[in-house]
Amino acid sequence: MSPSEDEDHRRAERARQVGLFRYGLIQDLIDTKLTTRQRGKLARELAAKEHTDPFGRQVRVARGTLDRWARHYRAGGFPALVPTQRQVTPRTPVEVLDLAAALKKENPARTAAQIQRILRTTQGWSPTDRTLQRHFADAGLTGASGEKSVFGRFEATRGNELWTGDALHGPKIGGRKTYLFAFIDDHSRAIKGHRFGFAEDTVRLAAALRPALSARGVPESIYVDNGSAFVDTWLLRACASLAVRLTHSKPGRPQGRGKIERFFRTVRDQFLVELDEERVGQIEHLAELNRLFTAWVESVYHRTVHSETGQPPIERWLRSIPRPLPLPSPADLREALLWSEFRTVTKTATVSLHGNTYEVDPMLVGMKVELVFDPFDLTEIQVRTAGKSAGKAVPPPGGPAHPSEGEAGDTAGVGPADWNRLPEDPRRDAQGEHREGHQLLVPDGRRAGTAMIDRVQGYFGFTRVPFGRNLAPFMLHQHHSHREAAARIAWCINNRAIGVVTGEVGSGKTVALKGAVASLDPARFTVIYQPNPEVGMRGLYDRIVTSLGGTPKFHLAALATQASAALAAEVDERGRTPAVVIDESHLLDHQELDAIRMLTNYDMDSTTPFAVLLIGQPTLRKRMKHGVLAALDQRISISYQMPTMSREETASYIKHHLTIAGREDTLFSDDAVELIHLTSRGLPRSVNNIAWQSLIAAFTEEKGIVDESSTRTAITETHATE
């Protein structure tokens, strides 16, 4: 990388830090619940204070600047707060600033305006008083107020209005120190997220916060201290993406975190006190400690009347939240919680991340790229350059090693259970080997212990494993959105039209496509399926030509013409209608989408010899409305957004899969089905995962019916490992 490119990268990083600083200042001002008077008062208070900028300097921000930032955020979101790059060179002579500092030291009571007048009188010229103030702040010549604060009692008015987070030092497991991250709801005192870990870092903080946001909803504000894990840029980025106000307490002033500190005292007095040396010595894995703590929280703390509120925490929280509880979509939550790091691609077209070596596109050699990834899944690393996707990094053979490997269960999820009498650990197979929780939980394409699955299947009398993906088309559940999507896909292919089918992650888009394709006559239709659009247009042209029996040409222009001719020949010579299906189409950029439109131009745009189906997430529909894609948008005959299942459809979906597995009687209680629907938001894939884990939880507790308690255990497991 050239020095100029490296400098541009540093400037872009500084600009992003400034954008996060600006968001941290205005996050309270953009609250729509504030009146004009309240917003004005708050803006004046912010303008009157000094703030620490991203570079450690104490600065003041004018009222007008705060208002302008707030307007920019409402108009353009977080990117509008990131300043454009510019070159600023100092213009004030160093001698003048040194003289001003000397005058300030001589009499600290002198104001910047007074020193400005002295300099004008003696030197004939002076910088502005604001320049002098910044210089005094950098030199540490500004004094702090000695006023003492008076603190009053505060309580949030409803659940999920304010969460307070902190960390507690726990017992030693296997000779290693543990730390408990926890978040408490200020109104109800209910614990929203918690996790023991072997380190007080951001990875363990994410392990506690991720399932809380997924299962308990998104709070309006989060209040934390200034620990290294809480001041990490990742947490501020996540809050900015989810529109959560992040507030840090001032160093040396912990009074605002009294509720979480009081909870930690309860943990020490009621939970940790029972873990004597003998009991701790029996805990082999951190997952077991987390399971014990979850059981105590759910069965003791949440069910006990709180001395301050006069109600059990979980009941007070449930009464104060809206029904149904609004939850973030899996796609939004995953995007908000992604990490990013920058790496320079080596000469061997590889990059290093957390001790693993990944292969990237050879065209990126020598370039500095951004690696975007989920810290809990290092198998999928997105590579970006200049803000655009550059494909995915290929993990090392055998899979990447996670930085927390060797810490069995460090970030594994656990669910409620009897914390004094532990049932048989479902993470052990028939040979007693310990397995991490997420390797054993669902049959939906994940790793699982075969012996454990056989035991669950035999216990409930299943003839096959339920809630799996390996279903024949005639076995699929025909809920409303599936039928509508399959019908539109079939119509689109029959009429050689362009169609767009979108839906949230796990809504059943590919399953609907599978059902629609199964209904087609293979003698009349040829389906060309492209599951990975990140191969670009060359990869799509190559797939079309090879699927139709040709040998792809080398040059892109010739390959595009060859693909168009092959599609036309399939109709004219063989009498079969080709259907080009592109999955994950939301990953296509504008140029690739426009190239697909150009591919449909045939016989002076009088006809199209093939059908095109774009399958993707809801962002695809929004992008189609951009002006640059107007030509493609006008050619779209079918555009369908798949809704989620209703409560009745979720119940029918669960019963359908149980019937296929050989159980036609009632196996899930009504409250368990209600909880599954509420948590999964009616997304079939999420229903599969939670329902399967509910069966495991009921099997572990030796129950014949899956009740609400078993489902809550499953929800904790699912959202901690997804």
Image (cartoon, rainbow, N blue to C red):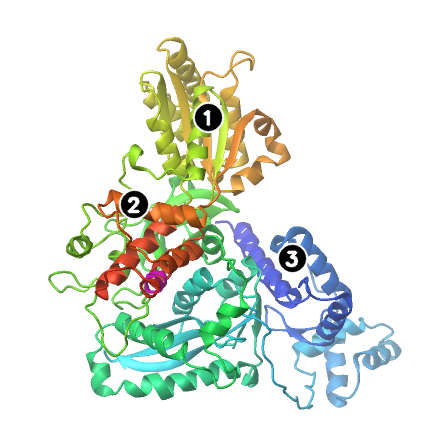
Amino acid type at circle 2 is His
Label 3 Cα neighbours within 10 Å, binned few <14 / some 14-19 / many ≥20: many
Residue shown at the point (25%, 42%) measured from the top left = 660
* Residue indicated by mark 1: 612
- SS at circle 1: strand
Amino acid type at circle 1 is Val
Residue shown at the point (59%, 32%) measured from the top left = 629
Camera-side residue: 460 or 59? 460
- The region drawn magenta spans 711-715
Closer to the chain start, of discs 2 and 1, is: 1
Residue shown at the point (26%, 72%) measured from the top left = 288
**Residue 675 seen by the camera:** yes
What mark, if any, has residue 81 been given in the picture?
Answer: 3
Q: How far apart are the two marked residues, 3 and 2, measured between alpha carbons?
A: 49 Å
Closer to the chain start, of discs 3 and 1, is: 3
Measured along the vertical axis of the image, is residue 466 above or below residue 228? above
Expressed as whole percent of the image width and height from the top left, the position of residue 32 reads: 68, 61
Q: Quadrant of residue 179?
A: bottom left
- SS at circle 2: helix
**Residue 538 seen by the camera:** no
Q: Is residue 361 magenta?
A: no
Amino acid type at circle 3 is Leu
Q: Is residue 97 left or right of residue 605?
A: right
- SS at circle 3: helix
What mark, if any, has residue 657 been given in the picture?
Answer: 2
